[in-house]
Amino acid sequence: MKIFPSLFNQFVNLLIPPRCVKCSSILENKEGLCTSCWPLISFIAKPYCACCGRPFDFDIEESALCGSCSYDSPHYKSARSVFIYTAESRDLILKFKHTDSIHSAPLFATWMTRALDDLENPLCIPVPLHWSRLFMRTYNQAALLAHEIAKVKGWAYYPTLLKRQRRTPSQGYLSKKERIQNVRRAFNVPQTKKELLQGKKILLVDDVFTTGATLNACSKALLKAGAYEVHAVTLGRVVTP
């Protein structure tokens, strides 16, 4: 007997109803957040910096750059994020990153693709973990997001093009200057992979944009290895005053 996908999905939803990724209440929609939690998440919309995606507090032309990008241009051409990393949105990422809530990856990737409408056919590459940290955590959350984005958009996914060649201390409590120093020369492209990068557009995927130091270091390594240009997308973004 053939079961139509829509009927099968209704059956699954009846047995395992979709739940809010924040509070776990049963959802009436497929957007991932209930009506109570949705207003708590500060989704990023224009206007924002044309380079790093930092949201502006006032209307300004789309090509405008923030002060940081005007002073020191990043190696990536653009970076976009879904929501501002706040006390309310932090638990979405922490649960996904540390409690094996990997079922959220397809939803988060769908949100992330909405910020990539102007990007055409890049290679999707996650920010890599050092092998020792990957062994302890068992999965790379950035790789899950990159894989799902590639599936949604029909783009190529290359999880091993970029390597973290040394284990760096956690960036959590470091200043911007310390973060830049911490990831200096931490990433490289293996010699056997460089041919795949030549002249290619890259989409670099990570979970959180804090100062941009990690994305910048990864972009520098990819460009040095022969990539044409690098764009980046993250789920959350820290916005300091």
Image (tube, rainbow, N blue to C red):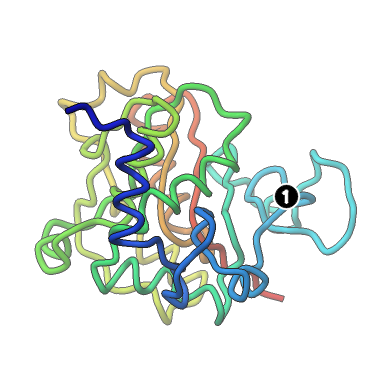
Q: Which residue sits at x=27%, y=73%?
A: 98
Q: Which residue sits at x=65%, y=60%?
A: 43
What percent of the width, then of the height, locates residue 210? 51, 66
Crowding at dot 1, Cα within 10 Å, few <14 / some 14-19 / many 20+, comes out as: many
91 relative to 63 in the view: left or right: left
* 196 up-or-down from 152: above or below: above
What percent of the width, then of the height, locates residue 151? 35, 33
95 relative to 90 in the view: left or right: left
Residue 26 visible, this orientation: yes
* 223 up-or-down from 51: above or below: above
Q: Which residue sits at x=25%, y=18%?
A: 195
What percent of the width, then of the height, locates residue 78? 59, 41
Residue 209 visible, this orientation: no
**Closer to the camera in the image, 5 or 149:** 5
Callout 1 amino acid: Cys
Q: Which residue sits at x=21%, y=38%?
A: 160
132 relative to 43 in the view: left or right: left
Q: Which residue is tagged 1?
A: 49
**Closer to the camera in the image, 212 or 102:** 102
What percent of the width, then of the height, locates residue 138? 13, 62
Determine whether the residue tagged by mark 1 lies in a helix, strand or loop: loop
